[in-house]
Amino acid sequence: MNFNFILKPKTFFEEISEEKIGLKTPLFVVLSISIFSILNFVIEVFYFNSPRYGEALIFPFLMKLLGPMLLWFLVTSVFSLLSYPLDYVGNFFRLLKFIGYSFYPIIVFQISKTIMILFDPPFLGFNYISPSSLIRASILFWLWSGDLWIYVLETTRDVELKKSLFSVFLILLMLFFLLNQEIFALIL
């Protein structure tokens, strides 16, 4: 796997734009987010007896399982809808593929969240991890994804930088609104 997206995201997306449209790797990325979200959920609920979810565990579990996929389609759909009035039309599945690749930072967040949860158990008395610190950390990783989305729009839709920044700003604003409403916490 080519990890150029960290140092040279524009080059990375230009390289994979030459490839046939395949959704295996982006689907793997999104499913990895689901797996780590479920792992974090299970650790919180069963290992630490977290009262955060109460008795109804099935809804948060399903949201952790299906939420990243729904978010993947939501972000792709909004980018697709934003590009139509600007006459920047491209292949929806290519955009879906590229948006899936740009979720790599969220995998990094989920892995780091798992490590933080495992190495900061509340019974040791440290308890440095608060929901607000996790939200702040997730914002940094979503900004990283937003940075990748700028290159995604430039590559898949031929959107100029200024309009690409505006579109990404709208999506991130929507995601941060969801984050503030705790809806986002159920998904990730």
Image (spheres, helix red, strand yellow):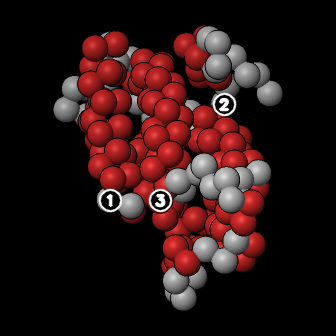
Give the residue drawn at x 47%, y 59%: 185
Tag 2's secondary structure?
loop
Quadrant containing the C terminus in the rendered view? bottom right
Q: Nearer the viewer, residue 106 or 55?
A: 55
What amino acid is found at the position of numbered circle 2 in the picture?
Answer: Lys
Q: CA distance from mark 2 to mark 1?
A: 38 Å
Say if 83 sits above or below 110 in the image.
Answer: above
Q: Which residue matches tag 3?
A: 185
Q: CA distance from mark 3 to mark 2?
A: 35 Å
Q: Which mark is residue 181?
A: 1
Q: Which residue matches tag 2?
A: 20
56 sits left or right of 37 in the view: left
Q: Are marks 1 and 3 in contact (CB under 8 Å)?
A: no
Mark 3 vs mark 2: in front? 3
- Say whether residue 127 is visible: yes
What amino acid is found at the position of numbered circle 1 in the picture?
Answer: Gln
Judged from this view, the residue extending furthest toward the left is 85
- Say whether residue 142 is visible: no
